[in-house]
Image: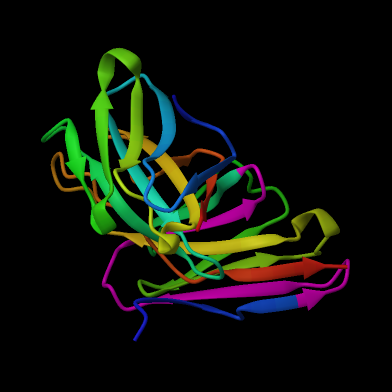
Amino acid sequence: DADVTQTPRNRITKTGKRIMLECSQTKGHDRMYWYRQDPGLGLRLIYYSFDVKDINKGEISDGYSVSRQAQAKFSLSLESAIPNQTALYFCATSDADRAVNGNEQFFGPGTRLTVL
Amino acid sequence: AQSVTQLGSHVSVSEGALVLLRCNYSSSVPPYLFWYVQYPNQGLQLLLKYTSAATLVKGINGFEAEFKKSETSFHLTKPSAHMSDAAEYFCAVRGYNQGGKLIFGQGTELSVKP
């Protein structure tokens, strides 16, 4: 079974619609992240959460909101979708920092969102 | 602040040839460096990471990378390419004690010709 799951895997919607992307993890990690991937731009951080009560904006948070419902669940919402939010969205998790250990992030399979 | 530059958005090699994917970073604090691979229609998978323990880092699938502080580089290599190596590769950096945030390069798509 996958450790980080995302639903839906694919979604086509229209401009102005509200969309929620969901992420669940069974790794027991405190930290969760939402990225979007665009061709030629790599991955850019939208929001991140270090625990249920700690949510922070990333570099491209405008037009997005998040909810950390539990340690294992982190949802991304587009309140009013627009075409330039068409992208591949990834959720990731990581353990908290431990001294000098560079803890890697573990990624879900992605959600491909198309906004018409 | 940290940043990552991957030189070459597309690299093509023949099967059996050397793979070299370039990554240069900028960091105001000692960095952690990562290489991730993304196969078609999949999420990102960690290939290897540098955490200051050793400058030459070995990863999965025969890949390795060398941290060169003087050149601010962390290039990824594999002596002999295999068809299954065709994928997109991302270099990422985060600073020591900078929390868990990763800064990614723009990615390099590797094609392997038979």
The percent coordinates of residue B101 (x first, y second) are: 40, 44
The percent coordinates of residue A99 (x first, y second) are: 13, 42
A104 sits left or right of A75 in the view: left
The percent coordinates of residue B22 (x first, y second) are: 43, 32
Instruction: Say which quadrant the N terminus of chain A sits in.
Output: bottom left
The percent coordinates of residue B65 (x first, y second) are: 27, 37
Residue located at (28% from left, 13% from top): B70
Instruction: Say which quadrant the C terminus of chain A sits in.
Output: bottom right
Is residue B107 at least partly visible in the picture? no
Say above or below: B37 vs B107. below
Foreground of the two, B13 or A31? B13
Foreground of the two, B17 or B75? B17
A91 sits left or right of A82 in the view: left
Foreground of the two, A101 or B51? B51
Q: What stretch is highlighted in magenta?
A: A12-41
Residue located at (66% from left, 74% from top): A20
In which image quadrant can residue A26 be found? Answer: bottom left
Say above or below: B38 vs B64. below
Residue located at (35% from left, 20% from top): B72
Say above or below: A10 vs B54. below
Residue located at (28% from left, 48% from top): B63
